[in-house]
Image (tube, coloured by chain):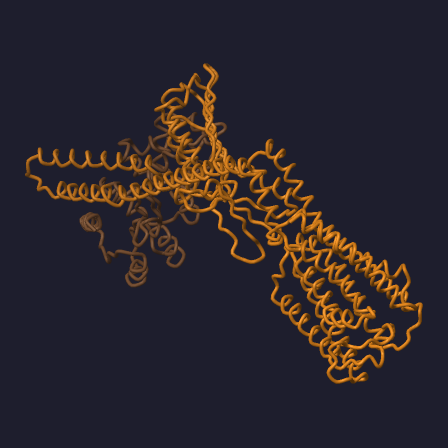
Chain colours: A brown, B orange
Amino acid sequence: MLFREGLVRVLGDGGFEVVAQVGDASALHRAVIAEKPDVAVVDVRMPPTQTDEGTKAAKEIRERHPEVALLLLSQVVEAKHALELFSEQPEGFGYLLKDRVLEIDDFLDAVKRVGKGGSAIDPEVIAQLFGRRRARDPLAELSPREREVLALMAEGRSNRGICEKLVVSPKTVETHVNGIFTKLGLAPASDDHRRVLAVLAFLRS
Amino acid sequence: MKTLQVALLVAGVWLGVAVYHVQIDNLSGYTTPARSWAIVVGAWLFLFTGTFAWFRRPANRLGPLMAAAGLALLLRQLRYSHDSALFTIFFVVGELAYWVVAMAVFAYPSGSVIDKAERILIKVGFGVTFAFTLAILLIYDGSRPLKFFDPSPRKSAILVHGNGDGAVALQKAFVIVVWGLLAAAAVALIVRKLVRATPRARRVLAPLLVAAIAVALRAVFESVFTFVHRPSAILYDYLFWWQIAAFVALPLALLFGLLRTRLARASIGDLVLELERTPPQSIGAALARALGDRTVEVLYWLPERSGYVDTSGRPAELPKYADRAVTRLKHEGEPLAALVHDPSLLDEPRLLEAAGAAARLALENARLQAETRAQLEEVRGSRVRIVNAADEERRRIERDIHDGAQQRLVALALQLRSAQRRLPEESDPEVDRLLAVAVSELQVAVEELRELARGVHPAILTEDGLAAALDSLVSRSPFPIELDADEGRLPAPVEATAYFVACEALANVVKHAGASNAKVTAHQHDGMLVVEVSDDGIGGARANNGSGLSGLADRVEALGGKLRVESPPGGGTRVVGEIPCAS
């Protein structure tokens, strides 16, 4: 409750209009139908079982109302869950640890990105994917800076977002991105979703 | 007792000789020495076998009954005497001899007639036979023979009103009732007994088949020579010898049946020797052989439970249905064990008693073993319950951390963050700094709580199973670890145990092994989940007391599994947990 109030305040202060706040899955479905929001921010744990009602509700909303963007917040994130959620439809979808809300600007950026059809994947998930072992690990060929840029790309950030995050020029970011794609043997992607998909596909392989 | 038996035998032999002469003297034309001897020998066989059985098994009434039947069959023949008094007495009581035979047949092998229908038949038989013969004699004036081979007519000593035709008619009615209806009923009851018997009982009851044949043949014989006026000599001869053969075979069959149980008792001697080298779990089989009942089962009494357990220590109930019988064995007044067996064995209480006595010492040992097993079973069960309860508790703590403390801290941090962002431009920069520090401290606390909860019981283990949890585990490790785990869910305690084994082993790899490569595998085969963590580090690890692995070894063993640590110095470390996962 307290968290939801805080979240509403953060979103309100951030320039979003909060059209509804609800406490369980069925109220969420009704609110989605009634208000047709641009983005629904959903906690994974919901009553009554406090396990994964939020995930189920999110999947259902994606099927019935694909136009509604979804941002799932969770106490713990797992790469396995992220890959499952994103493999179906990566556009307009986000999966973040709950405490990412505390980095308010980053969080608001993620909500915006998701609302515009982009994606937001928690850095923790990306770290897990980086931590996986591969037979011949091309990630080892990346420079530390390139790894950072790859992680931010995987989170769903645009070049501009990466520039801001790393405090470097757009030109530098572009150079890194091209370098990464070449070293990993990926075809250059024209837009941000395709880029996220390509990077995720690479990381899960 | 012995004097009585000897006297009986002597009297029987003398009576037999006398009866032979009565027959030869009075049935000229219808009997021959061979026929007369045959009848005497048949009766003697009843007497001898009965006395023998009586001598061997004084407690069983079957012996005296068979001896009595033998005597009665001899006395019956005195009805052919010319003497009016002898004729009268033995005409009336003579026919009762067959009902004494019937009693012996139905009392086989226990010595008493237990079945209600059989008792009624015997009572009716005695009553009807006595009434008919008495009635016949009241009107029998000797004017014509009662049967065609009767000796020249004799007069009844208790004649009231002479009516020769009436007497003959009554005699015919008597044969119809006794040798028609009642004999058929007797055969039916024997067949019923055989059909209803359990396989073991049927083997014991086999001699009764001879009895049924004897009764049937005798009935045919009686009927033919009552209703056919002058049958041919060949037919007479034929029927006579067949029924004699059956009546000679009957006591021998009964004796054989009794000897069989004597043989069984002899096997008790073998049992004693056998039990010397029988492991406790095979006592039941040894008893089964000695008692000739393959279905014997041994249950042991556990005083502290006031109940029975089977050989493996599992609680067992005594059977409540009539198709199984129970013999309770005691030792110094205390219950020791119970034999569950075929009800037919109850007919041989001495055999059961002897077997029980022979097996007592072995049973006492086996009972102690069963008791130990039962306690072990209980301890095992409680170990599993403790592990499960601990897992359940861990899951609960994990949920509580997420839904309680962590949730509140995030909310609190968010409030502080909002406050921080609402500070007016001109406010003290120190306030802004303090709020920022407070928020970042809370973030650290939340992160720590998340790690703590994961360590207690990762949510992904409950939600997605072992393979997913191991995947999550290795992807968080500081260096890449190879993982090969079977998908698919297993019982929660098995998954949790395997996970914590891998978790602890990996923690050791990271902390102590100095390894550059590690591998985690989890595969199922032959009903076992084998989880293995291996590295190429310095080796020399041991699961000694107090280490995390020894606690896990207890946990693995609680589920009936094994935990091995192979860690030669310089040769890397391999931790292998095998956990039964029959689901």
Lateral position of residue B256 relative to residue A157, left or right: right
Residue occupying image coordinates x 71% and y 72%:
B182
Residue B200 vs residue B39: left or right? Answer: left
Measured from the top left, where is residue B476 in percent x and y? 37, 32
The reply, left or right, for residue B119 in relation to residue B9 is left
- Identify whether B457 is placed above or below B123: above
Closest to the observer: B504 or A84?
B504
Q: Percent from the top left, x then y, of residue B501?
A: 41, 31
Most foreground residue, B388 or B501: B388
Q: Nearer the viewer, residue B335 or B575?
A: B335
Query: Which image quarter: residue B553?
Result: top left
Image: B229 above or below B240: below
Q: Nearer the viewer, residue B4 or A22?
A: B4
Query: At which x and y percent is residue B377?
Result: 45, 39
Residue at the extreme top: B570
Residue depicted at 36% across the width and 27% down the height: B548
- The residue at 58%/57% (across/down) is B323
Return the x and y of residue B273 as percentages of the image width and height.
Answer: 63, 33
